[in-house]
Image (spheres, rainbow, N blue to C red):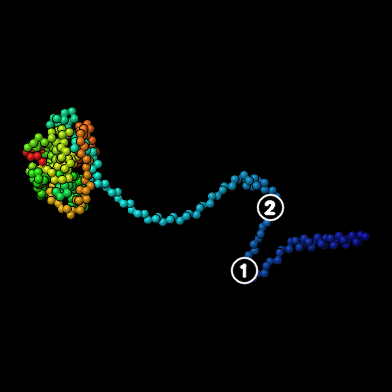
Amino acid sequence: MKHSTRIFVFILALLTALTVFACNTPAQQPVPSNEPAAEVTTVTSTPVPTEIPEIIDVIEAVTPVPVTPIPTPEPTPSPEPTDTPAPTEIPFSYYAPTVNMTFEELVGSLDDFNEADPNNESTFRLPIGYPAPDTYRIIVDLTWQVVMVFSKDPETGEYTVPVRYMLCSTGSGRVGSETRTGVFKMKPTKVRFGKFASSPESAQYWSLIFSKTYFHSTLYNKRRDLSSVQKLSYTMLGSKASHGCIRLTVPDARWIYYNICYDTEVEIRTGSKNDEQTKAIREQLHIAEWKDNAFLSVPTTPYTDNWTIDEIEIDPAYPYVAATQPPVKKS
């Protein structure tokens, strides 16, 4: 029994010693080789937490932000070609405002008199001065009984830009003399409400062309009396009817009186029936019909012209010149 125990103890000790020897023996070293060693990737396992309540709470607390999709831009269509708008046509009345005026305005006007004392000659309003003589050029056509005023074309320098068209009455051989033709320079003489030398008749807004030939209004039997306007001189506008002067409506005579400077060129021409351009102007120059028993006075005379005296661009080199009116026979 003792002998068996000893053998057991001996075997146990031997096993223990072998175990200790095996644990302390170094690991076998790899045999050197000329080939490069293969890379060894070590995968480390990350332990999975058993609980993630905090992360879940954070995810649930964040409100998802909606993402608006960016629309795909549509191609911009090419602009369709558009027609260039035609320029607005200027009405004929712009050049001939008398076609829209009343009878009262065509035969009456004392608006540039002193209303407090219209019979006082010294209270007439005279022109202060005028635009330069080369501002306008005037053509009087005897065939068509038309007065045409032109200004310069800034590009060509020619007088081709229409300014004003007027119906007129020129001299008739049947009543005295024809109006003389030619090219003239306007004279300084201006008369506001002048009287003829050979009769009590008178007219408004005289502007001397040459000698004793004037632009002036239709006739009155009595000076500064609008109601005395002569019917025949008014109804004959557009026909040869004077003794040589050029009769106009009151607004047209007034325009020349204030706007046309002395030395402005005036061409009085015979004209031609084949002149289609002047014919077309004449055919549109109509005026209001004569009105019997018209009540004409200063307060009731209208003013619808397209300019005023104060708007005139006066050249200081051409002031008004007080010139004496030469004696004039009835015209």
Residue toward you, 319 or 162:
162
Classify 59 as above or below 33: above
Is label 2 or label 1 in front? Answer: 2
Rate crowding at label 1 as few (under 14), some (14 to 19) or many (20 or more) other CA atoms within 10 Å: few
Residue 108 percent coordinates (x, y):
19, 36
The mark total stands at 2
Residue at 23 percent across and 43 percent down: it is 99
> What quarter of the picture does the N terminus occupy?
bottom right
Question: Seen from this angle, which residue lies furthest bottom?
Answer: 34
Residue at 87 percent across and 61 percent down: it is 8
Rate crowding at label 2 as few (under 14), some (14 to 19) or many (20 or more) other CA atoms within 10 Å: few
* Residue 306 in which image quadrant: top left
What amino acid type should be assigned to the residue bearing mark 2? Val
Q: Earlier in the sequence, mark 2 or mark 1?
A: 1
Residue toward you, 45 or 96:
96
What label sits on residue 47 in the rendered view? none
Disc 2 element: loop
Residue toward you, 200 or 61:
200
Residue 161 percent coordinates (x, y):
21, 49
> What quarter of the picture does the C terminus occupy?
top left
What amino acid type should be assigned to the residue bearing mark 1? Pro
**Marks 2 and 1, Cα distance to the nearest angstrom?**
36 Å
What label sits on residue 48 in the rendered view? 2
Residue 232 percent coordinates (x, y):
15, 40
Quick check: marks 2 and 1 in contact, CB under 8 Å? no
Does the image show residue 72?
Answer: yes
Residue at 20 percent across and 36 percent down: it is 292
Q: Is residue 54 left or right of residue 15?
A: left
